[in-house]
Image: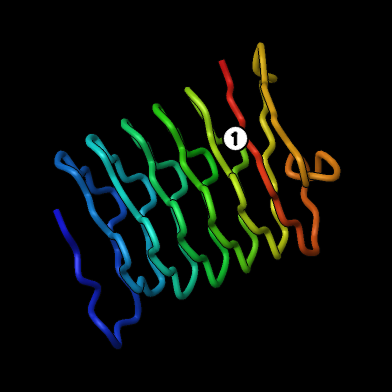
Amino acid sequence: ANFICPRNTDGIDFSNVQFDQDVDFNKCLIPESDFRHTIFRKGDSFQLATFLHIARFQDSRFCNSAIFHGATFLSEASFIETTFSDRALFDDVTFHGGVFFRDATFSKWAEFNSAIFSGESSYERKIVPQSFERNLQHFLRPSFMKAQTGMLKNGRCRLRQT
């Protein structure tokens, strides 16, 4: 399914929706968005999308690859308790507001190559995974694991949980 987000809207609400086909939000200007409790069964793509206001993905499930390559989040983005069953690709993403991955599950791996975190960011797990691989060049300290503020530019970051 391809989407064209209408202009001059207060927001879009896809909460509690199940997408059984591919979802394509590529290059969309997305107003405040609610994807809470949403299930993406096939591929989904938000490549080069711009989220103009808060983007809520809490407790959502991505059954195949979640592709956010080159997306821009101008406000807060919440992926709290979200499940990524396949790859989670956040390469070249810019987070201007806070981004939260608390209790998110990455079943295969997450890539944040050249991602920019300008606001508070957190990734916290209640259960420590058996192995956690990181390839970090410009990631000066493990602040992605705890809340932090200030500019964090990630030159290369690849996270894999098994």
Identify which amino acid the numbered label 1 is placed on: Asp
Say whether residue 86 is left or right of residue 144. left
Q: Which of 65 and 60 is in front in this view?
A: 65
Image position, residue 22 (x, y; %):
19, 44
Q: Residues within 10 Å of mark 1 (few under 14, many from 20)?
A: some
Q: Residue at x 37, y 56 (%)?
A: 47
Q: Is residue 11 above or below residue 110?
A: below
Q: Residue at x 14, y 53 (%)?
A: 1
The residue sitting at the bottom extreme is 8
Q: Is residue 73 above or below residue 21?
A: below
Q: Residue at x 19, y 64 (%)?
A: 3
Q: Residue at x 69, y 36 (%)?
A: 124
Image position, residue 148 (x, y; %):
80, 54
Image position, residue 62 (x, y; %):
35, 37
Q: Mark 1 points at which residue?
A: 103
Q: How is the image coloured?
A: rainbow
Q: Nearer the viewer, residue 134 or 101?
A: 134
Image position, residue 37 (x, y; %):
36, 45
Say whether residue 105 is left or right of residue 129. left
The residue sitting at the top extreme is 130
Q: How many marks?
A: 1
The quadrant where residue 134 appears: top right
The quadrant where residue 49 appears: bottom left
The quadrant where residue 162 appears: top right
The kind of secondary structure element at disc 1 is: loop
